[in-house]
Structures are given as C-alpha cells and as structure tokens.
C-alpha cells in the first residue's frame, strides 16, 4: 500500500523538551534536526531533512529506552541533554503526495527496492534507497521497525511534508506514563 494523496497520518515522536523553546527551535516539538548522515534513511542535507516518526506512542518511546534492555529503567533515564523526554502526536497532511510503504510487496516492485535492502542496517544500502523513494516523488517512506513487524516507522522528507505537519501538546514522560510502561513491557525492561 502506498498512502493515498489527501491522507492524514497520525504519528508519534519522543524528544528532549524545553517548554520555553520557540516553535521549530531545538528542544521544541517541531524541531527537525539537520541530517547527520547517520540516520538509516537520511537524505543529503541539500535535498531534504528527514523526520523519523513511529505509528504508536509505545514504539516512539521504545526507540528512546531500548538501551536499557536487560537493565532497569528509572526516571533519570527519561532525560536527554538535561531536558525531560516528552511524547508528541504529529499529524501529517500529505495532500497531493504519498508515502511509499516499503512493507507492501507491490510498492517494493514498483520502486525497484528489494526487501532485503529495505531491512538492511547498513547506511550505504538504506540511504540510496531513501534517495530512490525521494526521486520518485514520495513525501516519505514507511517500513517495519527493527524491533519486530508489529510496529512501523515513518520517515517524512520535510521539504515535501513539513507544510502539512502539525504537532500536538507534548506529554512529559514519567515511569508511570502508559507509553513508557507499554514500551518497557514490549522490550522486557524493568521499571525502577
């Protein structure tokens, strides 16, 4: 499946939150970090920034707490760069374009992407794949999580999707937050 034009996507992200940060500034819900080249589906800086999002709150949290697998997670671990972590809903109205669903065999065939290429953890494989999706006019791509196939991630190319993105009210994460307890359960992380 390729998302249909005029579709509105509901996605999630976790980020270090500074309540005083201005819209779009670092530590704000809408901040899009510049490409570093280290992201799985990063595009070259001059083409587009990308925003990595999850389709569920638990998955978004799991991406941030996964280093504590096999160890306990405490409230102190829910901070980055001296700021508390927060969860925010991202609504993406991608009218006039679509997101390539790399979980769909038909999309893989139509975009010329082999399934093993999209599942690779090697950036020299996945970044050219993102470029191929970009070159075909998509606003981003969807693929299964590196955790397991029940979760999916969406990478949006912000130069094509940013105008339609809106960010909800951030929720500061705590050990008792439902998304934290859910992610910890999925990952087998003990909450301290």
Image (spheres, rainbow, N blue to C red):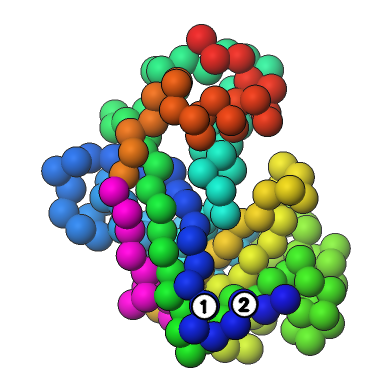
From the viewer's perspective, is residue 38 above or below residue 98? Answer: above
Apparent side of residue 82 relative to residue 116 in the rendered image (left or right)? left
x, y percent for residue 54: 55, 53
x, y percent for residue 34: 39, 61
From the viewer's perspective, is residue 150 above or below residue 52? Answer: above
**Magenta-highlighted residues:** 160-169
Apparent side of residue 59 relative to residue 163 in the rendered image (left or right)? right
Displayed quadrant of residue 78: top left
Neighbor class of circle 2 (other Cα within 10 Å; few <14, some 14-19, many 20+) is some
Q: Is residue 142 magenta?
A: no
Report helix, strand or loop for mark 1. loop
Q: Nearer the viewer, residue 172 or 121?
A: 172
Q: Nearer the viewer, residue 39 or 174?
A: 174
3D distance between C-alphas at marks 1 and 2: 7 Å
Give the residue number, with chain letter if any, for mark 1: 7
Instruction: Assess whether mark 2 and mark 1 are in contact (beta carbons under 8 angstroms).
Output: yes
Q: Which mark is residue 3?
A: 2
x, y percent for residue 113: 79, 76
From the viewer's perspective, is residue 118 above or below residue 128? Answer: above
Q: Nearer the viewer, residue 88 or 81?
A: 88
Residue ranking furthest to the top: 192
Report helix, strand or loop for mark 2. loop
x, y percent for residue 102: 73, 70
* Residue at the image position 59 percent from the left and 43 percent from the top: 59
Q: Is residue 165 magenta?
A: yes
Neighbor class of circle 1 (other Cα within 10 Å; few <14, some 14-19, many 20+) is some
Displayed quadrant of residue 109: bottom right
Q: Which mark is residue 39?
A: none
């Amino acid at each position: 499946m390729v998302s249909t034009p005029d579709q509105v996507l509901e996605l999630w992200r976790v980020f270090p939150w500074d309540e005083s940060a201005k819209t779009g500034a670092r530590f704000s819900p809408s901040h899009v970090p510049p490409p570093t080249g280290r992201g799985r589906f990063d595009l070259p800086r001059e083409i587009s920034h990308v925003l990595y999002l999850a389709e569920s709150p638990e998955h978004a949290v799991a991406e941030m707490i996964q280093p504590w697998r096999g160890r306990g997670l405490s409230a102190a671990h829910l901070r980055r760069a001296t700021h508390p972590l927060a969860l925010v809903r991202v609504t993406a109205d991608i009218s006039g374009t679509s997101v390539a669903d790399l979980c769909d065999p038909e999309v893989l065939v139509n975009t010329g992407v082999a399934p093993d290429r999209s599942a690779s953890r090697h950036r020299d494989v996945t970044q050219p794949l993102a470029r191929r999706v970009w070159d075909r006019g998509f606003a981003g791509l969807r693929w299964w999580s590196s955790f397991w196939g029940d979760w999916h991630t969406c990478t949006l190319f912000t130069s094509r999707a940013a105008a339609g993105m809106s960010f909800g009210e951030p929720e500061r994460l705590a050990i008792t937050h439902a998304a934290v307890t859910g992610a910890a359960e999925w990952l087998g992380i003990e909450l301290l």
